[in-house]
Amino acid sequence: MRKNAELLLHWKKKAYRHRAAYLFVLPAVVYFAIFGFYPLASSVWLSFNRLNILISPVPQFIGLQNYWYLFTRDHHFWLVFKNTLVWVVGSTLLQVVVGFLAALLLNKKLRGRTIFRGIMLVPWVTPIVVVGIAWRWILDPHWGLMNYYLQRFGIISDYIVWLGRDDTVWPMLLLASTWKGYSYMCVMILAGLQTISKDLYEAASVEGASSFHTFFKITLPLIRPILAITLLVGSIETWNNFRMIWVMTEGGPGYSTSVLSTYVFTKTFREYQFGRGAAVATFSFLFVLIFSLIYLKYTKAEE
Amino acid sequence: MSAKSKLGIFLMAVLCISVLFGGVVWGRTVVHYIEPGTSEVEKARVERLAREISEVFPDIEMQVEYIGWPDLNDRLITMIMAGNVPDFVLQQDFLPLARMGMFEVLDSWIDENPMHGVTRDIFVDSLLEYSMMDGNLYTIPALGVPYGLNVREDWLNEAGFTLDDLETWDGFLEVAAQLTKDTSGDGRIDQWGFVYPTGLSRFGWRHAEIMAHSNNFYLDEIGENPEKGSELLDFLLDLKEVMPPGYMTMGLQEAFQAYSLDQVGMMVAGAFMPANIITLSGGPEALIHTRAVPFPKGPSAEEFRVPVNNSGYAMFAGSRNKEAAWQVMTYLSSKENNLDYSAQIALPTRKDIAAGEHGEAAAFYYEDYGDEVVEANARFLADYMDIMAKYGIPRHKLLAGERLEREFTGIINDYMAERIDADTALQMISERFDEIMEEYQ
C-alpha cells in the first residue's frame, strides 16, 4: 500500500517536472484520440455488428459473422483481395524501380539538372483525380492517344480496349499509378543518394571498381534504410489509394477492378452495409499492420 | 461581474437563441434547400428562383446548398446524422432515405393543404406513381424522365429505313447492322449502329432494364422470367456486332460523346439528352437529326413499354420549417415553374402543360444554337411527351439497387466477353439477385 503511494508520488513529481513537455504533446494526443483512435475503435466495434441502415438503423451485435460472411460467402472478397495485392506489389515495385533510375540520373552532374528535378515533380503535385481522368482519356479505345500513336508507329494494327480487357486493364492501371507515384520515390531516394560520401566513390574508383560493383557494394547498401522506409510508406499509400482506381474504373465493371479501399467505400457508402464495410476496413487495417511489423522486423529499418 | 463573465453570458445567450430559433433570421424563416443540379445553367435558375421567393414570400428566405447527384444520398445521410437537417431536396432515388424514415410522408400535406394549385390529379399518373412507396407519397414530381431510344433519323433514312422499322428487336438489329460501317474507307469500322455502355454499373443496369421493359418484364424479376431473360441475353450478345468495341469502358457521358461525334447512330437515353450533348463538339448538329422512339419490342412483348421515373421535391421528416418548406415546394411545382424547369432539362410532370408550350419554353435555353436546333429540340421533347403519355410505366424502385447493379453489370460483362455462356449468366444473375433480395425482406 505504502509502496503504491510512493510510486504515485514519484509519477506525480515526474509529471510536474515534465509538465511543459506534456502540454506540448497534449494537442497531438487529443487530436489523435479524437480523429485517429476513436474512429478506428468505432470501426472495429462496428465490424462485429449487423448494420445495414436500409434495413435497420440499430446495430445488432453478431460477433464474427461479418468476417465469416466475407471469407466464406462473399462472391467478390477474395478477388478484391487478390486485386489489392497485384495493385500494391506491382505499383510499389514499379514506382521504386522507376524512381530509383530517375534518382540515379538526377544525381549525376547533368546540364539542366535543376530543371529536370523540377519537371520530375509534376506528376507528384498534379491532383490524382486529374491524373486519373487524363489517363482515362489517353487510354480511350476510340480516340485515345495511346491507340493513335501505337497504330501510327505500326506497333498495333487494331485499336485496343485497354481498360476493358483482362490482360491489359491491370498493366494500364499500374502504368498510371507508376507515373503518378514515381516522383515521390525519386525524391526520397535522391535525398538518400546525396548523403553518401563522395570519398567512398573516389576510393572505389581508385581501387578499379566497376560501375556495377560500385552500385551494388556502395550505393545500394548505404541507401537501404531509406529504401526500406520508402517501400513501406509507398506500399501503405498504394494500399489506401482509393482515388486513382475510382476515377479510372470505379472498381468495375462489376467488382473486377475493385481493391479493398474501393470495396470498403462501395459496401459502406453505396450499399449502406456499414457492418460489412467496417469488417473489410478492419481486415485491411490488420493486414497492413501485421505486414508492416513483419517488414520492419525483417528489414530492421526501425533501427 | 467581470467583463469576462459578461462576455461569457452574452455568448451563451446568443448560442441559446441560435439553437431555439435556428432557421429564423430577423423574422424571416430560412428554408434550407439542397439542389443536386450543379451546372452553371442550373445554378443560375435556382439562384433566380431564390430571389423570386424572397419577393413572393417576404417572410421566407430560400438558402440553397449544392450537392451533386452522385454524392447526394451519402451526404444527406451524413448531414442528418450530424443533426444538420435541411428542409427539402430534389430527389430521384428517394427510396433509401424514405426507408430510413428521413423523408416526410406528403399525403396529408397535399390532401389537406394543396397550395399553388398543387393537387394529386395535376400530375402525370405514371410519374406520381413513381413518387410513392408503400402507398405513401414521398416526393412532388418536378421533372419527368422517360427512357427510350434516341435515333439519328438522317442515318436511318440514308440507309433506306424509317422510324417505323424500329418496331421489334429483329428490326432494330437489322437497322443497326446497316448503320455499322467504314465511312472513311480505310478498312476500319468507324460508325456503329448502337451503344450499350457497360463501363459503369449504373448504366450497365439501367440500359438493360429498359431493354427488359421492352420485352415485357422487370430486370430485377429476371429469375421469375427465365425465358424472357434468356431472350434478353441473346439480344445483348447480338448487339456486340453493332457496337463500338470499347462499350465496356463507357459510361453515359462517353456514349453521348460518341453519339455527338457521329460514331453511333442510336442509343438509349431520355429527354435529358439535348442538355447533355448540346455543349459537346458535334452535339447541336446531332440533335438536329435526332428523334425519340420507344425501345423496340422484344419477342415476348405485345406492346411498347417505356420506363419512367421522376425527380421530385422531398421534405425532410426532421425539418423545423415544414410549413415554409411546403409553401416553397408547391410554389416550385406551380405550372409556370414546372414548365420553366422541365424546359431546361427534361419533361414537365403536370398534365396541364402541352407539348407545344413546353417546346416554346425550351427555346429559351437553346436559342443561341439557332432556329434549327430550337425546332429539333421541341420536336424531340414532343416525341418523348407522346411516348411517355402512351406507354409510360414507372420503373421499379429497388432498395438494394446499387448491389443489383454491380452484380448484374459484372456478370453481363463476363457474358458479353464470352467468358461464361448464357445459361450460366442467367443462373448466376438469378441466384445473386435472390441472395441480395432475401437480405432486404
Image: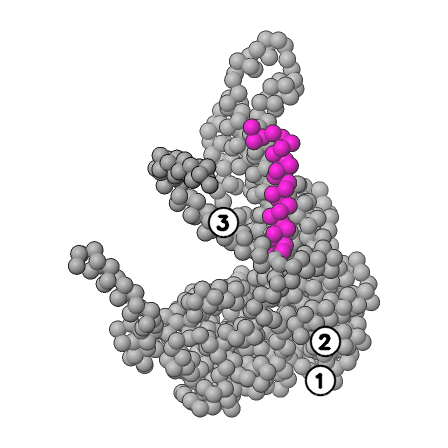
Q: Is residue A116 visible?
A: yes
Residue B209 seen in the current view: no
Going by the numbered disc 1, the residue's amino acid type is Glu
Q: Nearer the viewer, residue B84 or A131?
A: B84
Q: Quadrant of residue B35?
A: bottom left
Specify the subunit that label 3 lies on. Answer: A
x, y percent for residue B311: 52, 76
- Viewer-closest of B1 and B197: B1
Report the chain holding disc 2: B
Residue that mark 3 sits on: A36
Q: As rendered, which of B73 and B342 lies closer to the eye?
A: B73
Residue segment shown in magenta: A277-303
Which badge, 1 or 2, is on the more N-terminal residue? 2
- State which chain disc 1 sits on: B
Q: What is the spatial separation of the Cα atoms under label 3 and label 2, in whole angstroms?
A: 44 Å
Q: Residue at x 64, y 45 (%)?
A: A287
Is label 2 in a helix, a strand or a loop? helix
Place of residue B422 in the rendered image (x, y in percent of width and height, measured from the top left): 81, 66
Q: Residues within 10 Å of mark 1 (few under 14, many from 20)?
A: some
Q: Which residue is mark 2?
A: B221
The mark total stands at 3
Q: Is A70 drawn above or below residue A123 in the view shown? A: below
**In the visual, does A98 lie left or right of A155?**
left
